[in-house]
Amino acid sequence: MDNMIEIVSDVFDIACWIRSLGSYKVVYNLDKRVFQVRDAYSNALCVTLYDRLDYRSVYTVYSTMRQHADEIFALVERHNAQLDRQAEYNAQVRYEQTLENIRRMI
């Protein structure tokens, strides 16, 4: 904790908003020059934020809370399925282009 400063208050009360979401504390990591949200009891790192506290900070903490895990996993699954479909389409296009190139050579 020597390289961190706990943020108790700030101009826009972002630290207060984050603390209201759960048992969190906001610290500024002097080595990495970013704000971090840590568990208030165990000091475990919960999420690394940005170089300044703003609305993104509250949104990031809120959206990555354990209660939203199902939504996050569903979003990841949809994204992975989309990537798989795109990869299959690209493979099909490359296959057809290769066949067309072979036909031209014959």
Image (spheres, rainbow, N blue to C red):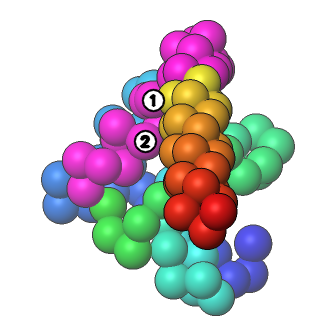
| Residue linked to disc 1 | 63
Assign the C terminus to one quadrant of the image. bottom right
Q: Nearer the viewer, residue 75 or 103?
A: 103
Residue at left 32%, top 61%?
53
> Which quadrant holds residue 9?
bottom left
Is the residue under label 1 in contact with that under label 2 (CB below 8 Å)?
Answer: yes
Query: Whole-percent x and y of residue 71?
Result: 53, 14
The correct choice, above or below, for 22 with respect to 35 in the image is above
Residue at left 42%, top 56%?
8
Question: Around disc 1, counting alpha carbons within 10 Å, would you say few (fewer than 14), some (14 to 19), or many (20 or more)?
Answer: some
Instruction: Confirm whether the magenta stretch covers residue 86.
Output: no
Q: Which mark is residue 20?
A: none
Highlighted magenta segment, given as a residue range: 54-78
* Circle 2 SS class: helix
The correct choice, above or below, for 57 with respect to 27 in the image is above
| Residue linked to disc 2 | 60
Query: Whole-percent x and y of residue 35?
Result: 49, 66
Type of residue at label 1? Ser
Query: Whole-percent x and y of residue 54?
Result: 25, 56
Residue at left 58%, top 15%?
74
| In the image, farthest residue toward the bottom | 31
